[in-house]
Each structure stands twice: as C-alpha cells, then as structure tokens.
C-alpha cells in the first residue's frame, strides 16, 4: 500500500502534467472504479467533464484534485483518487497502447498547457481493482489551516478538503503539524507506539514500512507503550519519521514490485536503503544483530532485538 512518500511523488507528477488542464472527456472503463461515488459512474462523469483539475493536493496518503469552474475559478468539489494496493496514475500520449488493467482515462482540451503535455491524457491503471475514484464536496478544514500540500496555498479552495478526508490528521511533513499536540495525545493513550503511528486520525501518511524504519532510527520497540513516552523521545521519533520520509521522497519512494510507479511509469528505489523493513535475518546496519520479524496486526514488524529491546511492560 503506498505511504506518504509514494503518494507525494504521484502528487508532484500530477501537479507538473495535469493541474490546470480542462477535462474534455472522462471514460470509466471498469464497474468498480467509481464504486465510492454514491450516485454512480454516469454522475461522476457529468461532474468532471468541462471542469479544470485546478491543483493536486495531498494529506497523508490521501490525494485529490479540486474541480474548478473554468469561468468562475471556484471549486466546490474535488476528484479523490484512491490508489489502493496497485493503482497507478499515468500520463500517456493519447495514442499510446492501452494498458491491460486500464480502468479510467481523462482527456483534456489543449488550451493553457505545458508544451510537452500537449496530446497527453491521464490514465488510472489498477491490476487488483482495490483503488477507485469519487467526486465529493469540499468542506472547510477543522483547524482553519490548509487542507493539504498543494501548489496553490492561497487559492480559495486551499483551506478546504474532501468531506471523506475531514477526519484524517495532518502528516509529519505538513508545516502545520503540531508536534506538542501529538505528544499530548500519545501520552493520553494506552497503546503501542506503532499502533499509534498507523492511526490516521492521530498522525497520517505513516504505514508499515516507514513506521518500522522510523522506530529503528529512534531505537524504540513497536510495542513500547505510548503513555510512557517522554516528550524528548517523541521529538526524536518525529525527527526520524521526517528523515526517513524525506529520504524516500528523494529516491522516488519505495517499490517492491512493478505496481508502484510515478506518473511517468518509473519505480522508486528507496527499498535499497531500508535498514530493517523486509530484512529479517540480515544484520542490523547499526550493530550487526540479525533483524527480527514479528507478526503484527495481520502484517509484520521488523526490529533489531539489540537496538530496540522489547519493553518490560508491553501492550500486547
């Protein structure tokens, strides 16, 4: 499942190639692609055609494109795209061969557009069909701040976000993220620190990969009770999250197979820099102790038993 760095790589590609373009035609090519749009696929198409994809915005793992009226410039709704486990947003030439698992496409008017984007379209390819799209209302952000990271922070829609995303917390790379508030909320809970990091209503954008990598950098075991974390330890953990996510962004994200790619079809290569995730039995880069794999919430956790000793009082 894509985490914050992978979704941000896609967002940047959409901002470069698609934002500001007016939709000429929407084609939904699979019955499941619009299942999250309550009014059905025909209504989704009607709400997209003729409008401008005004920006590409991200909060945590959530990605949306505000839909602006080309005359008035206002945006009351947004196209939310869920990548799921295998969804890809690709910018292709209109006459390029269709991908086997093509689920949707958007063609554009070639009015204001970068010269190298003329004749291109946006495609949604999804092998496993867990992803999808919906056109949803924009609502004001609960804290009055920007809805997420986009290219137009002063636009009228910048302080709004899609209604289904309103409960999602800010992510550690968001300039408006409140470190002190997270520290307080962690210390009010009786749960393990990794469970807390995966709670998108507490802190967004963190998934299994970057939780394990950040906890290794912070020398914290995944089952360390949050109630006992000192403020200094939370600061170190947040610093580790930001470091690992920034490094992953610079590498284009983490790709373990061909399913995660950017809008140009290129895979990220941060998997070559992972310290513990997916490396059970390999030596810890810090102390050479073999990395341990534990079952965790129907998935896996990877730790160094020496650098990240299990707490005496664990949560599970």
Image: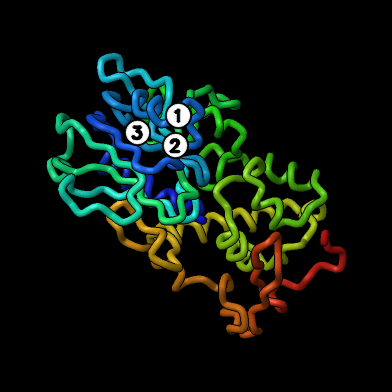
Name the secondary structure under disc 2. Answer: loop
| Front in this rendered view, residue 129 or 314 | 129
Numbered tag placed on residue 34 in the rendering:
2
Visible residue check, residue 142? yes
In contact (CB < 8 Å): disc 1 and disc 3: no
| Lower position in the chain sequence, tag 1 or tag 3 | 1
Name the secondary structure under disc 3. Answer: loop
**Mark 3 lies on residue:** 55
Q: CA distance from mark 1 to mark 3?
A: 24 Å
Return the x and y of residue 213 as percentages of the image width and height.
58, 65
Q: Look at 47% across and 47% down and name the residue there.
A: 131
**Pointer 3 local density, CA inside 10 Å: few below 14, some 14–19, many at least 20:** many
Return the x and y of residue 80 as percentages of the image width and height.
44, 36
Q: Look at 21% across and 34% down and name the residue there.
A: 108
Numbered tag placed on residue 40 in the rendering:
1
| Lower position in the chain sequence, tag 3 or tag 2 | 2
Q: CA distance from mark 2 to mark 1?
A: 7 Å
Name the secondary structure under disc 1. Answer: loop
């Amino acid at each position: 499942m894509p985490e914050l760095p992978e979704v941000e790589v896609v967002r940047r590609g959409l901002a470069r190639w698609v934002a500001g373009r007016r939709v000429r035609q929407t084609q939904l090519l699979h019955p499941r692609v619009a299942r999250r749009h309550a009014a059905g696929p025909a209504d989704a198409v009607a709400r997209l055609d003729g409008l401008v994809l005004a920006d590409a915005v991200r909060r945590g793992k959530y990605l949306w494109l505000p839909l602006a009226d080309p005359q008035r410039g206002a945006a009351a709704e947004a196209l939310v795209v869920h990548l799921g486990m295998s969804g890809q947003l690709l910018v292709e030439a209109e006459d390029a061969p269709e991908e086997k698992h093509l689920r949707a496409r958007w063609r554009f008017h070639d009015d204001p557009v970068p010269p190298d984007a003329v004749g291109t379209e946006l495609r949604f390819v999804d092998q496993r069909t867990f992803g999808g799209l919906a056109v949803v209302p924009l609502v004001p952000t609960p804290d009055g701040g920007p809805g997420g990271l986009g290219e137009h922070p002063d636009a009228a829609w910048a302080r709004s976000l899609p209604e289904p995303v309103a409960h999602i917390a800010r992510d550690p790379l968001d300039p408006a993220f409140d470190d002190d508030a997270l520290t307080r909320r962690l210390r009010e809970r009786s749960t393990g620190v990794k469970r807390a990091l995966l709670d998108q209503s507490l802190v967004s954008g963190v998934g299994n990969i970057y939780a394990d990598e950040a906890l290794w950098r912070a020398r914290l075991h995944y089952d360390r009770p949050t109630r006992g974390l000192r403020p200094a330890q939370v600061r170190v953990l947040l610093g580790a999250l930001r470091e690992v996510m920034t490094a992953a962004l610079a590498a284009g994200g983490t790709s373990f197979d061909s399913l995660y790619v950017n809008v140009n079809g290129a895979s990220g290569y941060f998997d070559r820099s992972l310290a513990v995730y997916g490396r059970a039995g390999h030596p810890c880069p810090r102390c050479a102790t073999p990395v341990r794999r534990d079952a965790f919430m129907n998935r896996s956790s990877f730790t160094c038993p020496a650098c990240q000793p299990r707490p005496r009082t664990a949560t599970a």
